[in-house]
Image (cartoon, rainbow, N blue to C red):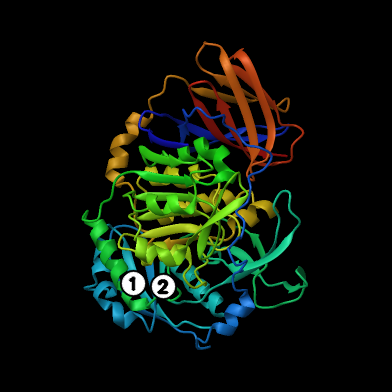
């Protein structure tokens, strides 16, 4: 089914995050976030689990492992970091860290005094430090870069833009997805550079598809405070073409976008293949926080490669694509899910998609260590690309509202990504790590999708609401009550689910405005509630403490 929907009329609510401490005093945290009230006709909710993005390709190819990548990497073992200069702004400090061999070719954009990109950043209020670093295959090079970021963070840095080939941290783990046995994986992990006060260790090594005690220069343990502290945006082009040429063109597009000479249709394309059709209304609704107009394509027999090729030639500022994939392409099911049609990344330069930003719910599409990776091809091998968000492994983003809500408020891509990662880190478990650890931003992270002044001007209108939801925990019991403020009794559905999409409670009642959830039998952790009426929807984050 194809929908062209206007979302400007959707109800929106401001809600608090509720903490429920069993048998003790209850505290309400005054963290406010936007939540979209969806009005689609489809049934909302979650089944027992969300199908994970599968690594699938026409030739059954698999991405390079750390060992294979290391053998192909011939960078110098020496590591050095140097500061070129700092230019002042009124806002937070951003480190632009550039491959030292590449920097001389990009001074037109990156010179601290005269560079166009640096000037654009300072005009937007950033303080900018331009630094250079050698690419290195030294296993400890990622530690060197991270220690530098820690020192900069301690002096006010809020994020970094990594330009060209720079040290890459790798992580290994056992994937744990519902319904599948554990499976070994290793992948590049930029979260290593975002979480600066967590503990990262190498305590295991791979053996026969399992992890055993040992060491192999790959991180495998993440402990302590695991929230993201800074944003990281990566501009790696060597795997998709000529470094200096592609980056020169990228910074030109970047400047044009910043001065409003590069605007596309304020519409999003939401292209979702068969396995996730069920979540169309919820996920498209979350994207509706940012875009009033969304073209939704979700019919199982329509979402095929030929149709996708046609759609991406039409102007959309944002494209969200949901498809089983591999680094160099997407697979779309058809014929009742029995056949596959293929879209290849090498087609992207010829098609030249008309879009600025991509959210790739697509296995390994942001694995920037792979040649012709989709994230890099969409961003750097087109006339319009400015950024792509995706995973460097199996898995993708979920709980999109925590990414789109900051964007809707005029925050930059990097801040929105950091805030999303920080929320996900509150409930790290084997399954959530498997979904989210590979998430990567291939973009200038300081770009905004909605102008902050526009977002502020519209904020008062967003607060209008005829019906409010009151959530009341009862410390003397394990019950949490969900009460609608209006007196009209109607069909009300309550769904409680975990961060991995599993439903832990579901109840539907006729002719009521009150529902009650018994949370006494569930483990402590983070949960999400959906209250659904025939014309409104309320979503809340709940933290259950023992």
Write down the residue under mark 1: 247
* Residue 534 at x, y percent in the picture: 52, 20
> Is 512 drawn above or below residue 276 in the view shown?
above
Please, what secondary structure does the residue beneath circle 1 have? helix
**Cβ atoms at labels 2 and 1 below 8 Å apart:** yes
Residue situated in front as seen by the camera: 13 or 271? 271
- Residue 124 position, x and y percent, is 27, 57
State the quadrant of the C terminus.
top right
* 241 relative to 274 in the view: left or right: left
Disc 2 target residue: 237
Q: Residues within 10 Å of mark 2 (few under 14, many from 20)?
A: many
The correct choice, above or below, for 376 with respect to 507 in the image is below
Identity of the residue drawn at 59% across and 20% down: 492
Taking the spot 50% from the left edge, 40% from the top edge, the residue there is 299
The quadrant holding residue 406 is top left
Mark 2 residue element: loop
Residue 233 in sight: no
Q: Give percent across and percent down for residue 29.
A: 54, 37
Residue toward you, 545 or 317: 317
């Amino acid at each position: 089914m194809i929908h062209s929907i206007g979302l400007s009329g959707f109800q929106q609510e401001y809600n608090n995050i509720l903490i429920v401490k069993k048998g003790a005093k209850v505290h309400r945290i005054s963290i406010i976030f936007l939540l979209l009230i969806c009005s689609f006709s489809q049934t909302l909710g979650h089944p027992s689990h969300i199908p994970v993005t599968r690594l699938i390709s026409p030739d059954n190819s698999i991405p390079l492992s750390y060992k294979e990548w290391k053998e192909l990497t011939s960078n110098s073992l020496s590591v050095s970091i140097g500061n070129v200069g700092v230019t002042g702004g009124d806002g937070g400090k951003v480190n632009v860290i550039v491959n030292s061999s590449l920097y001389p070719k990009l001074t037109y954009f990156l010179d601290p005094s005269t560079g166009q990109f640096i000037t654009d950043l300072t005009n937007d209020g950033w303080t900018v430090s331009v630094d250079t670093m050698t690419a290195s295959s030294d296993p400890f090079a990622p530690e060197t870069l991270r220690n530098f970021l820690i020192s900069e963070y301690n002096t006010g840095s809020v994020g970094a833009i990594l330009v060209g080939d720079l040290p890459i941290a790798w992580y290994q783990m056992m994937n744990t997805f519902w319904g599948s046995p554990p499976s070994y994986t290793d992948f590049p992990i930029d979260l290593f550079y975002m979480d600066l006060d967590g503990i990262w260790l190498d305590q295991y090594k791979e053996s026969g598809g399992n992890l055993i005690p040992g060491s192999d220069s790959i991180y495998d343990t993440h402990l302590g405070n695991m929230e993201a502290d800074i944003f990281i945006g990566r501009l790696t082009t060597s795997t998709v073409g000529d470094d200096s040429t592609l980056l020169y063109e990228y910074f030109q597009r970047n400047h044009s976008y910043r001065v409003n000479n590069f605007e596309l249709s304020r519409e999003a394309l939401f292209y979702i293949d068969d396995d996730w059709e069920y979540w169309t209304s919820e996920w498209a609704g979350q994207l509706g926080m940012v875009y009033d107009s969304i073209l939704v394509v979700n019919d199982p027999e329509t979402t095929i490669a030929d149709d996708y090729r046609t759609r991406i030639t039409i102007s959309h500022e944002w494209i969200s694509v949901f498809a089983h994939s591999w680094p160099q392409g997407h697979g779309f099911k058809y014929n009742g899910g029995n056949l596959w049609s293929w879209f290849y990344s090498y087609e992207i330069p010829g098609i030249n998609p008309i879009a600025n930003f991509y959210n790739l719910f697509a296995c390994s599409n942001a694995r920037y260590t792979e040649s012709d990776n989709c994230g890099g091809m969409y961003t750097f091998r087109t006339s319009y690309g400015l950024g792509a968000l995706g995973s460097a492994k199996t898995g993708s983003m979920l709980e999109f509202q925590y990414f789109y809500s900051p964007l809707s408020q005029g925050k930059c891509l990097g801040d929105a990504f950091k805030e999303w990662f920080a929320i996900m880190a509150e409930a790290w478990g084997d399954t959530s790590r498997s979904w989210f650890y590979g998430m990567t931003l291939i973009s200038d992270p300081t770009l905004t999708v909605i102008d902050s002044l526009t977002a502020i001007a519209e904020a008062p209108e967003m607060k209008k609401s005829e019906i409010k939801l009151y959530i009341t925990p009862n410390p003397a019991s394990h019950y949490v009550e969900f009460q609608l403020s209006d007196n009209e009794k109607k069909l009300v559905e309550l769904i409680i689910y975990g961060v991995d999409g599993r439903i832990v409670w579901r109840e539907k009642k006729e002719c009521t405005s009150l529902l009650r959830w018994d949370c006494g039998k569930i483990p402590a952790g983070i949960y999400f509630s959906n209250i659904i009426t025939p014309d409104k929807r309320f979503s809340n984050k709940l933290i259950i403490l023992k």
